[in-house]
Amino acid sequence: MRLIITNDYDEMSKTAAEIIKEQVNRKANSVLGLATGSTPLGTYRELIKMYKNGEVDFSYVITFNLDEYVGLPDDHPQSYHYFMYENLFNHINIKKENIHIPKGISDDFDRDCRLYDEEIEKFGEIDLQLLGLGVNGHIGFNEPDDYINTKTHIVDLAEETINANKRFFKSIDEVPRKAVTMGLGTIMKSKKILLLASGKNKAKAIKETLNGYLTTDVPSTVLSLHPDATIIIDKDAASLID
Ligand code: F6R
């Protein structure tokens, strides 16, 4: 794993956006795996700036988001659909038909999860997967567990995740308890992975990610097996690294 430690959140975001821009400029029809949450917001702001400056063109780019809350409709302000349009897609020239986000409402999640994986496979592999990191080491919503789920699936959100994400909702009771997430197998098949983390609350998870062992108690440790994974973190997130 390649480790880049930046001075602060802004530098982390600019570094990540540069790598994504280079990817899209090298391959116009790149398949990008995208994350939501606070961490990639700065990266998305930088990409929007780059697009507006004519430095990057998203018209052939294909995207697959990592996850979505179960039970939230696309137009719910806390849904990841809403987040992606609000914070990125509405501001760049990506085509709507090239955007893929797991559905939070379905009468058959097993079918939809299978179709999501099939859709990714149609494009071959994800060229570049952007990841945030949960305080408990989750990537996507692959929570600590006894086993690794390789494919897109429904997951019970961990208590730490519900607590960490309650800041986005009026009360903790409104935080969905379940989500649909891409599996670790699909994430690991991506050609390139960029994991971002910022802030002291991610320092423990970063230390464990870099410890050099694999454990399903810290799902991000699986990244140590990836041939092209880059971790970009700020000084606070790096504060517990030996
Ligand atoms: C979101 C996702 C999650 C977040 C993680 C960190 O699509 O996949 O793994 O990246 O929970 O969230 P933030 O960035 O809000 O700290």
Image (cartoon, grey):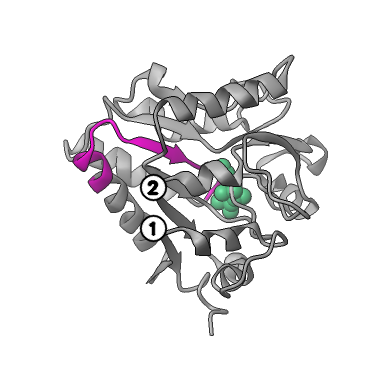
Would residue 233 be seen by someone viewing this image from the given angle? yes
Q: Earlier in the sequence, mark 1 or mark 2?
A: 2
In this view, the residue farthest toward the right is 173
Left or right relative to 223: residue 91 = left
Q: Is 111 a magenta residue? A: no
Dot 2 alpha-carbon crowd within 10 angstroms: few under 14, some 14 to 19, many 20 or more = some
Task: Name the kind of residue labelled 1 in the image.
Answer: Asp
Question: Residue 140, percent across and down?
Answer: 59, 45
Q: What residue did someone put label 1 on?
A: 228
Give whichever of 157, 11 is nearer the camera: 157
Q: Is residue 76 visible?
A: no
Determine which residue is flagged by label 2.
191
Q: Give percent across and percent down for residue 150.
A: 63, 43
Q: Indicate the secondary structure of the residue bearing disc 2.
A: loop
Point out the stretch of residues depicted in magenta.
22-38
Say whether residue 29 is magenta. yes
